[in-house]
């Protein structure tokens, strides 16, 4: 009996460490249906063992300690808060999704890679061509989206489309810059730039579109109901599948370059009433 008790105690000591053996530590910023869609895609084929921590469920999470003790092979950071915490880890690969914290096409942190919240500029330029727009207004903060506008300008130039760009450094400059675009553009492009597009400035974009009779092209389907003519929205389930593929490549040693990639799949959403009123057609993308 005593030997049996000793065996049970030994197993009880070992089981926690066995339970902690996993490949991917998932840090999720909060409980959110958008994040759930991403995770459905990521977990579809069950290629790896996971441990999921929803940060909003805890007052504080010591990720550095967890990584040191559990030694996961990869961290998946879902959302801005998750990426902020994951950046504290230096030696374990970090794959970030659903965050604007990695906007650039190359990561400044050697162990960090991810999928951008910016849709490939080629897809937007294709929409502009189908709508027969030639002068597209853009408001942005160079610190947040300058790298993206640099790529977009080159692609737009090849398509004979002029990007009429106005730079800002604070949200309060947005409305003034919008006013300065009146009569100078035949479309307005909203970027996922957290300086240019805020709760306080969003309405101004659609007011500009109405007053100037030009379509507003956005990055989120949520803006269709507010007056956007078209939105190119990231397919979140496909984003999860894309992240799953990147994770497998990293875990198998096939992917060593720490580079941020564009989302593989987007959905074109239309506001038919706005499009009919303006007499434009975005086609398919």
Image (cartoon, rainbow, N blue to C red):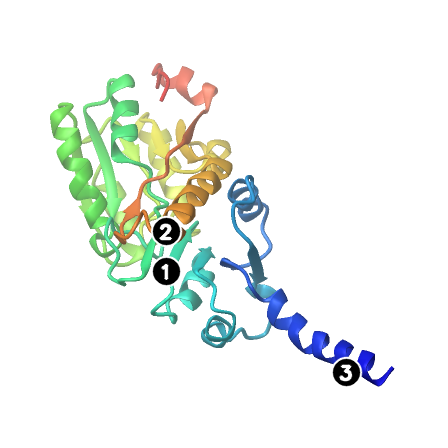
Looking at marks 1 and 3 on the same chain, the residue that comes earlier in the sequence is marked by 3
In the image, 62 versus 9, the foreground residue is 9
**Relative to 206, is 89 above or below?**
below
Can I make out residue 182 in this image?
A: no
Residue indicated by mark 3: 6
**Relative to 173, is 46 above or below?**
above
In the image, 23 versus 40, the foreground residue is 23
**Relative to 38, is 53 above or below?**
below
Q: Which numbered dot is residue 141?
A: none
Q: CA distance from mark 1 to mark 2?
A: 8 Å
Contact (Cβ within 8 Å) of mark 1 with mark 2: yes
Which mark is in front, 1 or 3? 3
Mark 2: secondary structure: helix
Q: Which numbered dot is residue 93?
A: 1
Mark 1: secondary structure: loop
Q: How many marks?
A: 3
Q: Quadrant of the N terminus?
A: bottom right
């Amino acid at each position: 009996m005593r030997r049996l008790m000793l065996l049970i105690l030994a197993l009880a000591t070992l089981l926690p460490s066995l339970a902690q053996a996993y490949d991917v530590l998932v840090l999720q910023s909060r409980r959110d249906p958008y994040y759930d869609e991403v995770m459905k895609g990521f977990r579809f084929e069950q290629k790896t063992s996971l441990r999921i921590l929803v940060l909003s469920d805890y007052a504080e999470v010591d990720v550095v300690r967890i990584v040191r003790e559990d030694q996961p092979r990869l961290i998946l950071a879902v959302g801005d808060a998750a990426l902020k915490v994951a950046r504290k880890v230096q030696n374990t690969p970090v794959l970030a999704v659903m965050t604007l914290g990695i906007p650039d096409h190359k990561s400044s942190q050697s162990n960090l890679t991810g999928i951008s919240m910016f849709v490939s500029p080629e897809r937007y330029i294709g929409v502009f061509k189908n709508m027969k727009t030639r002068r597209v207004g853009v408001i942005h903060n160079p610190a947040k989206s300058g790298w993206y506008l640099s790529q977009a300008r080159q692609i737009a130039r090849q398509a004979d489309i002029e990007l009429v760009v106005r730079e800002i450094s604070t949200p309060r400059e947005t409305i003034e810059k919008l006013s300065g675009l009146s009569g100078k553009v035949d479309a307005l492009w909203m970027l996922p730039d957290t300086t240019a597009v805020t709760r306080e400035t969003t309405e101004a974009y659609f007011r500009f579109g109405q007053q100037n009779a030009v379509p507003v092209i956005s990055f989120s389907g949520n803006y269709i109901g507010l007056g956007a003519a078209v939105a190119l929205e990231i397919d979140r389930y496909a984003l999860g599948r894309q992240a799953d593929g990147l994770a497998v490549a990293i875990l198998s040693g096939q992917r060593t370059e720490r580079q941020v990639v564009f989302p593989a799949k987007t959905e074109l959403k239309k506001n038919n009433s706005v499009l009919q009123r303006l007499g434009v057609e975005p086609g398919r993308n």
